[in-house]
Image: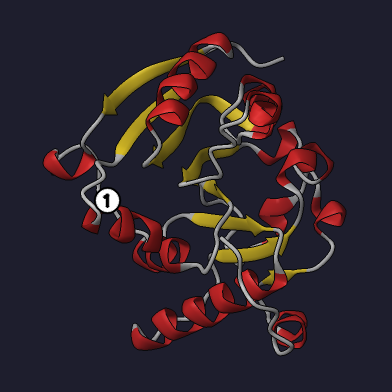
Amino acid sequence: MRIRYKKWARPELEASSFYVDNPEELRGKWKTRFMNPNLPLNLELGCGKGQFISKLASENLDQNYIAIDLVDAMLGLAKRNVEQLYKEKNIEPENVILTRFDIDRILLILSEEDKIDRIYINFCNPWPKGKHRKKRLTHTRQLEKYKTFLKENGEIYFKTDDDDLFNSSLNYFEEAGFKIIKKTYDLHSEHDFWYNIETEHEKMFSEQGIKIKAVIACLQITQK
């Protein structure tokens, strides 16, 4: 999604208590950055405007969350969404961190010591052209990177509107040693599939009559 430059985003992010500007410095020690470092640690890749992570984190105070995006304007909006939702619930955003980084280089900021319990990937770029498919966040090449810091039996929650991306991703998961726990080609028809937090893209696609595909994949290989 393209978004206009917002001159206020960078100053607001730098002043925020839950934004990290130099994530490389926390590689291997992310848990120490949270008020309660003993809680399970989860990760959203490509958080966009933050509607998903703000609701998820504010409803699950017994979990810690890192949300990554590459665009300051997106992160600025995510920061405001987190602040607003936490304020409405009269709580402090102590279990969520926003950071700016290129997900393709994610091993520069996360290591096996970080022990991520769950990864969320929502409506990522489908990169339909063959020469670009390795850029997909669910491509085997990327999944191999995630295996470095994802705990054994850790999970990836993935949803998309794109049929080709979804079907290809099912193959990517298996190639990378993940087990498909659940999958659906029509998420909104399966109300007990998971507790679904509807994203901005999801609402838009659903209103167009496009069915939402979703999968839970579990890492079951022994970590080195």
Q: Residue at x 56, y 60 (%)?
A: 1
Q: Is residue 176 above or below residue 188?
A: above
Q: Please give the count of numbered marks on the rendered protein.
A: 1
**Which of the 4 image quadrants contains residue 32?**
bottom right
> Which residue is the extreme one toward the front?
129
Q: Which residue does the numbered mark 1 point to in the structure image?
A: 196
Q: Is residue 7 left or right of residue 160?
A: right
Q: Is residue 184 left or right of residue 157?
A: left
* Mark 1: few/some/many CA within 10 Å (<14, 14-19, 20+): few
**Which of the 4 image quadrants contains residue 26?**
bottom right
Q: Is disc 1 placed on a helix, strand or loop?
A: loop
User: Is the image coloured rainbow, by chain, by secondary structure, or in one colour?
Assistant: secondary structure
- Please state which of residues 2 and 47 is positioned toward the viewer in this rendering: 2
Q: Is residue 77 above or below residue 141?
A: below
Residue 200 appears at what percent x and percent y? 38, 63
Residue 177 appears at what percent x and percent y? 54, 11
Residue 58 appears at what percent x and percent y? 40, 69
Q: Is residue 11 left or right of residue 94?
A: right
Residue 201 appears at what percent x and percent y? 39, 58
Q: Is residue 46 visible?
A: yes
- Please state which of residues 205 and 155 is positioned toward the viewer in this rendering: 205
Type of the residue with mark 1:
Asn
Q: Residue at x 69, y 83 (%)?
A: 9
Q: Residue at x 60, y 11 (%)?
A: 222
Q: Quadrant of the C terminus?
A: top right
Q: Is residue 71 left or right of residue 51?
A: right
Q: Is residue 198 visible?
A: no
- Please state which of residues 153 and 75 is positioned toward the viewer in this rendering: 75
Q: Is residue 31 above or below residue 90?
A: above
